[in-house]
């Protein structure tokens, strides 16, 4: 079986001798370490479940037995999505060896970067460096994104974005910082601003945007789709501009920068400029959900990726950006990215007030030597050292490692799309999708209705790869999401084509 991350060490002094999977670069994954089976067998699942300890033991089974129990009883019941390049479900990403190393150290050293205490630990410095390197990788100026923080994921980052947005738009509507949700609550701030409704205008939003709207008190019903009719993801400008005219209404515009079913982008650089102008005119906040789209900004210029680069152009015009590191950056769960250009606004919302025992240095007057305390920038006070795996993997592989990894992922997705587009049995979706528009997702269905109904099950039943299902225009569809650092175009295409061919021939 593939080695599993070693989360435990017998002695606390062994931090320097962390075992890790293998010393290989993002460039050349070693197939001998791949998991043979991506999903546990029904027997393994049953076995793991049956061995779960049912009630709290009064005496405890001890460390040695607990270790055996975890490795022998439970681990075989987990899926091996991060250990296989042939896991194409959802957009999960794997874990690079350097990220695993960083994550193991984060666990063993158990730092909690919340207050910047430069005389006690370097943890917040690492946090800040990692976020700054993320900005550099994405061609964003770190100093333009002073409110930046690692979150638990893009969902949490969308919550942060909408929380900043609602504060901003109500203060704008009132032309006064007194109309503050942070101080008065949403109802009080809306009353103070004379605003009856805060709307979130978007196109094909990820489900988490509605969840975020629910959490921050705007409500799922506040999210309004202003896209042109299917299948495209573009903004219908007439609908958007009409939506912006309502009386006593304030607005957050949320850009879907990479949609999960198709990988399509909502905007171009010119669109982002137009959105920026509209937001400035209407006092609106411009948020971008770029959970997995964001990394596309690390691609090289040129014809091959021009459509993708166009989809992530102009993000620097946004007020806030949500991203995921546990997706395409291939670090372990959980790690999201949040960037905002408005530090004072952010610290006003997220400040942990009057915790004098924490002796927090001032966070608003940031100098080169002063790093804002993370507990005043995000949801958590105590928090995991999520920065370390990011720091480790970006240091190990650099801009080129990540750029070439993403290029391989896109090339594999396009090669799969080419095969599907030219096959008699399968159909590439959305219809009319050009090859240059394909990012890391390939949406398709079988032309034969009966085959299509069981397609995902049949593809996965061969146990050589894993795809997830979805619904497209009311019908079942399947989806390849290429997101692992272990991707190799030629090697993986062969597996995919073999499986698609076998299933089409009915040899499942
Ligand atoms: C995955 C995803 C999210 C949610 O991210 P989590 O990491 O699961 O919280 C939000 N938006 C988009 C576009 C996504 O792809």
Image: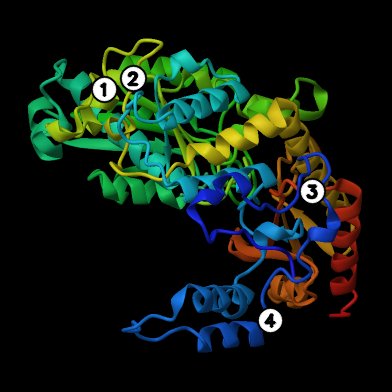
**Residue contact at pointers 3 and 2, CB within 8 angstroms:** no
Q: Residues within 10 Å of mark 3 (few under 14, many from 20)?
A: many
Callout 1–callout 3 Cβ contact below 8 Å: no
Sequence-wise, the earlier of marks 1 and 4 is 4
Side of 277 where 379 appears, left or right: left
Ranked by sequence position, the earlier of labels 1 and 3 is 1
Instruction: Mark 1 and mark 2 in contact? Answer it, CB < 8 Å.
Output: yes
Is residue 265 something that shows in the picture?
A: no
Residue at the spot of label 4: 41
Q: Which residue is mark 3?
A: 487
Mark 4 or mark 3: name the one nearer the start of the chain. Answer: 4
Per the image, label 3 sits on a secondary structure element best described as loop
- For label 2, the residue is 342
The residue that label 1 is drawn on is 345
Residue 72, horizontal then vertical, whole percent: 62, 78
Q: Quadrant of residue 350?
A: top left
**Precedes in sequence: disc 3 or disc 2:** 2
Which residue lies at the image location 20% right of the left edge and 33% below the top edge? 358
Residue 174 placed where, x, y %? 14, 20
Decide: marks 1, 4 in contact (CB < 8 A)? no
Figure quadrant of the C terminus: bottom right
How many residues crowd around disc 2 within 10 Å: few (fewer than 14), some, or many (20 or more)?
some
Confirm or deny contact between disc 4 and disc 3 (CB under 8 A). no
């Amino acid at each position: 079986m593939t080695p599993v991350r070693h989360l435990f060490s017998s002695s606390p002094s062994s931090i320097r001798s962390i075992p890790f999977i293998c010393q290989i670069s993002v460039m050349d994954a070693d197939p001998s370490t791949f998991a043979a089976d991506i999903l546990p067998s029904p027997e393994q699942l049953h076995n793991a479940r049956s061995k779960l300890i049912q009630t709290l033991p009064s005496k405890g089974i001890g460390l040695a037995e607990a270790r055996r129990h975890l490795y022998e009883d439970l681990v075989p019941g987990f899926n091996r999505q991060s250990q296989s390049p042939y896991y194409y479900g959802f957009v999960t990403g794997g874990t690079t060896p350097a990220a695993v190393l960083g994550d193991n150290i984060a666990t063993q050293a158990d730092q909690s970067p919340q207050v910047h205490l430069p005389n006690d630990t370097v943890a917040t410095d690492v946090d800040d460096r990692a976020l700054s390197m993320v900005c550099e990788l994405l061609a964003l100026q770190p100093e333009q994104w002073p409110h930046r923080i690692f979150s638990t994921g893009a969902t949490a980052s969308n919550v942060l974005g909408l929380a900043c947005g609602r504060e901003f738009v109500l203060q704008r509507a009132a032309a006064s910082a007194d109309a503050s949700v942070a101080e008065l609550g949403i109802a009080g701030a809306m009353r103070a601003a004379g605003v009856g409704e805060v709307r979130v205008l978007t196109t094909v939003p990820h489900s988490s945007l509605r969840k975020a709207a629910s959490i921050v008190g705007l409500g799922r019903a506040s999210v309004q789709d202003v896209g042109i009719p299917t299948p495209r993801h573009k903004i219908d400008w007439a609908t958007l501009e009409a939506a912006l005219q309502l009386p006593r209404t304030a607005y957050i515009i949320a850009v879907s920068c990479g949609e999960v079913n198709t990988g399509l982008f909502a905007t171009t650089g010119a669109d982002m400029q137009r959105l920026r102008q509209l937001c400035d005119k209407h006092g609106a906040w411009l948020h971008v959900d770029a959970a997995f789209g964001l990394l596309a900004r690390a691609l090289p210029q040129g014809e091959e990726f021009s459509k993708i680069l166009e989809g992530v152009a102009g993000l620097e015009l946004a007020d806030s950006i949500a991203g995921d590191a546990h997706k395409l950056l291939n670090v372990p769960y959980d790690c999201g990215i949040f960037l905002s250009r408005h530090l004072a606004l952010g610290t006003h919302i997220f400040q942990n007030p009057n915790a004098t025992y924490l002796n927090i240095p001032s966070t608003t007057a940031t100098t080169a030597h002063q790093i804002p305390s993370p507990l005043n920038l995000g949801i958590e006070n105590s928090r995991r050292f999520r920065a370390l795996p990011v720091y480790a993997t970006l240091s190990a592989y650099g801009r080129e490692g990540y750029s070439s990894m993403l290029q391989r992922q896109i090339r594999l997705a396009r090669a799969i799309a080419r095969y599907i587009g030219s096959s008699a049995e399968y159909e590439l979706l959305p219809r009319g999708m050009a090859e240059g528009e394909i990012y890391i997702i390939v949406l398709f269905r079988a032309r034969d209705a009966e085959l299509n109904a069981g397609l995902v099950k049949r593809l996965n039943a061969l146990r050589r790869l894993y795809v997830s299902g979805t619904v497209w225009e009311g019908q079942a569809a399947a989806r390849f999401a290429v997101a692992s650092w272990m991707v190799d175009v030629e090697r993986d295409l062969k597996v995919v084509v073999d499986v698609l061919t076998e299933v089409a021939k009915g040899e499942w």
